[in-house]
């Protein structure tokens, strides 16, 4: 009886691990895609393949998609903030910096969310620990990117693009909470509508700017199929499943797994360099994420120690 209960209790774990690997691998697949594709081509194809994957799943499960123009408008805004804009910016960023750097900077998303909430969504209050997390996060970014030593070459362009992408992620969370979460559709329906909208938004730019810059090769092909079908398609289903089975607090900790996966794959398969400052900077960024996501409290620990001394 207890073994069955344990199995049920931990049934979210395979999906959690799969999601961490899928999102952590995305930065490698972007690098592979860029061998053949333009930055807008990478963004468009990942969203198009993801949309087809989710649409097929929705049809197979007889999921009804949103049916009101106003709801599609909100989904289109989230699609720009969460898929189309960041998809393009991450591809641009990785033409200048390593996939390791991209994966580590992706962990600044919770930091950006708190900054956006502070100035634009004030009904969602932040506490003292989250404020401390913001300060630690900026220090981590400085160490991670080498800003104290001056950024070499065109690295600053890539870093700026990556941080702008996570800033868009930061806007998407409170916007979704206010305008999309209250909609009475299934998670699969919302995810499908969102990714379809992202592909539609990117289509004109892909047609104008072009999708490829050279002939296809095996790495680009498999990289884009994996990035689209898994990283932009099934990953959403796994994420919603994790939230349903384990709760949003546990599900959000995948944030700490993706940079690790991205770093290991970048070093192993792309032979990318990894500096000690990136280790320290990345650690501070993850600490910042933990604080702003309220995983633990520094102020509570200090106040308890202080009260014991008194």
Image: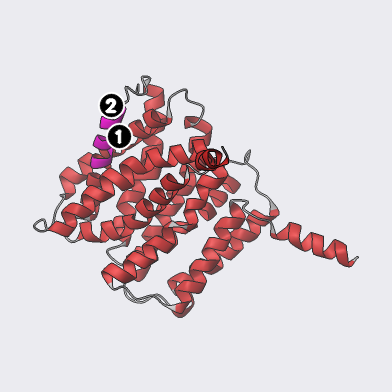
> What's the magenta region?
49-58
Label 2 neighbour load within 10 Å: few <14, some 14-19, many 20+: few
The part of the image, by quadrant, that contains residue 306 is bottom right
Q: Is residue 84 visible?
A: no
* Camera-nearest residue between 144 and 187: 187
Q: Distance between the residues labelled 2 and 1?
A: 10 Å
Residue 237 vs residue 107: left or right?
left
Residue 265 x %, y %: 33, 65
Q: Circle 1 is placed at which residue position?
A: 54
Q: Circle 2 is placed at which residue position?
A: 60
Q: How many labels does the image show?
A: 2
Residue 70 x %, y %: 40, 23
**Tags 2 and 1 in contact by the CB under 8 Å rule?**
no
Residue 26 x %, y %: 32, 55
The part of the image, by quadrant, that contains residue 145 is bottom left
Determine the residue positioned at 16% across, 43% down: 207
Q: Residue furthest top?
A: 67
Determine the residue positioned at 40% across, 48% down: 19
N-terminal of the pair, mark 2 or mark 1, is 1
Residue 177 vs residue 304: left or right?
left
């Amino acid at each position: 009886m207890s073994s069955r209960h344990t199995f049920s209790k931990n049934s979210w774990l395979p999906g959690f691990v799969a999601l961490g690997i899928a999102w952590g691998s995305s930065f490698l697949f972007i690098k592979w895609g860029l061998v053949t594709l333009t930055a807008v081509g990478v963004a468009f194809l990942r969203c198009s393949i993801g949309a087809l994957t989710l649409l097929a799943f929705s049809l197979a499960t007889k999921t009804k998609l949103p049916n009101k123009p106003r709801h599609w408008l909100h989904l289109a805004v989230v699609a720009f903030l969460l898929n189309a804009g960041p998809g393009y910016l991450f591809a641009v960023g990785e033409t200048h910096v390593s996939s390791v750097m991209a994966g580590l900077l992706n962990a600044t998303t919770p930091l950006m969310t708190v900054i956006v909430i502070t100035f634009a969504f004030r009904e969602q209050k932040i506490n003292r620990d989250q404020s401390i997390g913001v300060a630690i996060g900026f220090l981590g970014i400085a160490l991670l990117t080498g800003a104290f030593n001056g950024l070499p070459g065109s690295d600053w362009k890539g870093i700026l693009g990556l941080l702008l992408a996570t800033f868009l992620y930061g806007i998407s969370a409170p916007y979704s909470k206010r305008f999309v979460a209250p909609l009475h559709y299934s998670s699969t329906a919302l995810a499908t509508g969102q990714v379809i909208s992202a592909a539609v938004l990117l289509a004109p730019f892909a047609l104008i700017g072009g999708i490829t810059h050279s002939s296809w090769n095996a790495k680009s092909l498999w990289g884009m199929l994996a990035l689209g079908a898994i990283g932009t398609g099934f990953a959403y289903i796994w994420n919603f499943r994790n939230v349903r089975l384990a709760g949003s607090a546990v599900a959000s900790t995948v944030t700490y797994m993706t940079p690790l996966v991205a770093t290991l794959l970048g070093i192993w398969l792309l032979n990318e360099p990894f500096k000690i400052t990136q280790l320290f900077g990345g650690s501070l960024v993850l600490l910042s994420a933990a604080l702003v996501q309220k995983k633990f409290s520094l102020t509570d620990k200090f106040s308890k120690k202080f009260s014991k001394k008194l």
